[in-house]
Structure formats: structure tokens, C-alpha cells
Amino acid sequence: MAVKGIDMERYARRGHFAYFCAMQYPYVGVTQETEVTDLLAACRERQRSFYLSFLHAAALAADGVPQFRQRIRAGGIVEYSECPTSHIELLEDETYCYCTLRHHMPLEEYYPYAEEARRQCRQRASIEEDAEVESLYFISTLPWLHYSALIQPVAGGDESNPRITWGQYRQDGNGRVSLPVTVLAHHALVDGIHIARFYQNLQEQLRMLARP
């Protein structure tokens, strides 16, 4: 996983960067309904985890937007070549722990790797931050709720990890299945056009996963 610094003198959004960095709450968020009909059917047919399939798709979709791989560091910007995910694993006592996963591997390798990482995470039951925390996408799910809006906690300051959350899926009267997907990002790095590209990438990743 490589990381490079952004030349702020040549950075087209340097004025926007300074403007939003000066704000007390510089974060921008969007929730969009996302159809998963074909992916859900494919996961059931192939006996694959829907959760891991969607997580893999969301991570690749985020990596496809350079601004999602950028982080604020010491008043400047660094950009990672790829970003692992840090997701929440629910524990038996209804608390949770954090589990870090890499996703740049074939799916047939990703599923067993991810399941083993999840098992080890639940054994450790820790919410200690990963050593590579700056690079991570923060992932949460609300499988108990089909929501229309979501407010997420952030530490503020230079914390610029994108947060991606999704909720419970539901079926409409026509048999189509969808779920809400929320993105929260630091506005000093990410604009609406970049969030829109993430959702476009996500739809393409879901289509690819659902193909025979």
C-alpha cells in the first residue's frame, strides 16, 4: 500500500481545502437508496455472504475515487494507493469490536480470508485502533433498520477517513430489493461530484458481483 503527498501549490482545490478545514464541522454526508436485488439472489444461489460481498463492492467503489483515498495530514494531503476497511463486528453482549480487512484479492480468496479475520476479531473483542488507522475506510451497518438519514460521530480536526454505512434491505411491491447507503466524508477533500462517483462505482461493482 503506497502513499504519496499532494503538491498543495498545484492542488486545484487548495482554496476549498483551506475554507472547509477552518470549519468546526467540515463533513458532508449523503444517503442513497441502493438496489441489491440481483446481488442478493446471486449470493443466495452461490451460498456466499451478502455482507462480505457488499463490503467488498463498497471498498472497491471507494478506492475508485481518488478523493476517498486522500487524508489530511499536518495541514496537507496524502493519497493512498488503496485503503483497507475497518468494520464493526457485533459481539454476544451486544457491544462490538473493529475488524480490519484488505480487499484487493480475488473473491474466492477474499471470503475465507475475511471470515477468518472476523473470527479472530471477535475473539480479541477490541476497539483499539489499527496501526494503519489513517488509511482506513470506516464501515458500519444497521441491519435492524431501513433508515432514510443518518448522523455519524467524528473526532473532528484532521480526521478525514470516509465513513460508509448501510442499513436493512427491504423488498418493494415489485420484488425489487434495496437498502440505504450513507457516505460521510471530509468536505476539504471530497465534493458532491466525488460522492456521486462513489455511488456510480458501487452500482457497477454490484452488477459485476451478480453476473453468472
Image (cartoon, grey):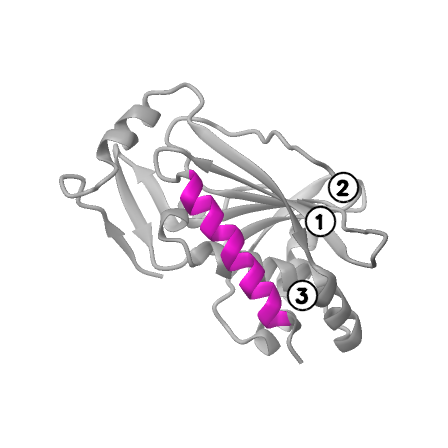
Residue 79, position as x, y percentages in the image: 31, 50
Per the image, label 2 sits on a secondary structure element best described as: loop
Q: Amino acid at mark 1?
A: Leu
Is residue 50 positioned above or below 70 on the image? below
Q: Residue furthest front?
A: 174
Q: Earlier in the sequence, mark 1 or mark 2?
A: 2
> What predominant SS class does the magenta segment belong to?
helix
- Confirm whether the magenta stretch covers residue 6: no
User: Are the residues at dot 3 and dot 2 in contact (C-beta closer than 8 Å)?
Assistant: no
**Nearer to us in this view, 42 or 153:** 42
Instruction: Classify 10 Å Cα crowding around label 3: few (below 14), some (14-19), many (20 and above).
Output: some
What is the quadrant of the N terminus in the image? bottom left
* Mark 3 or 1, nearer chain start: 3
Percent x, y of residue 51: 69, 59
Q: Which residue occupies 40% across, 38% down?
A: 191
Q: Amino acid at mark 2?
A: His
| Image position, residue 60 (x, y; %) | 49, 61
Q: Secondary structure at mark 1?
A: strand
Q: Quadrant of residue 45?
A: bottom right
**Mark 3 → mark 1, Cα distance in angstroms:** 23 Å
Q: Is residue 184 above or below residue 136?
A: above
Residue wearing tag 2: 146
On the question of residue 126 being in view, the answer is no
Is the Cβ of the residue at disc 1 closer than 8 Å to that at disc 2? yes
Amino acid at dot 3: Glu
The local crowd at label 1, few if under 14, some if 14 to 19, many if 20 or more residues have their Cα within 10 Å, is many
Of residue 76 and residue 8, the one placed in the foreground of this image is 8
Q: Position of residue 207 (x, y in %)?
A: 61, 68
Q: Which residue is mark 1?
A: 179
State the extent of the magenta-drawn residues as a range: 192-209
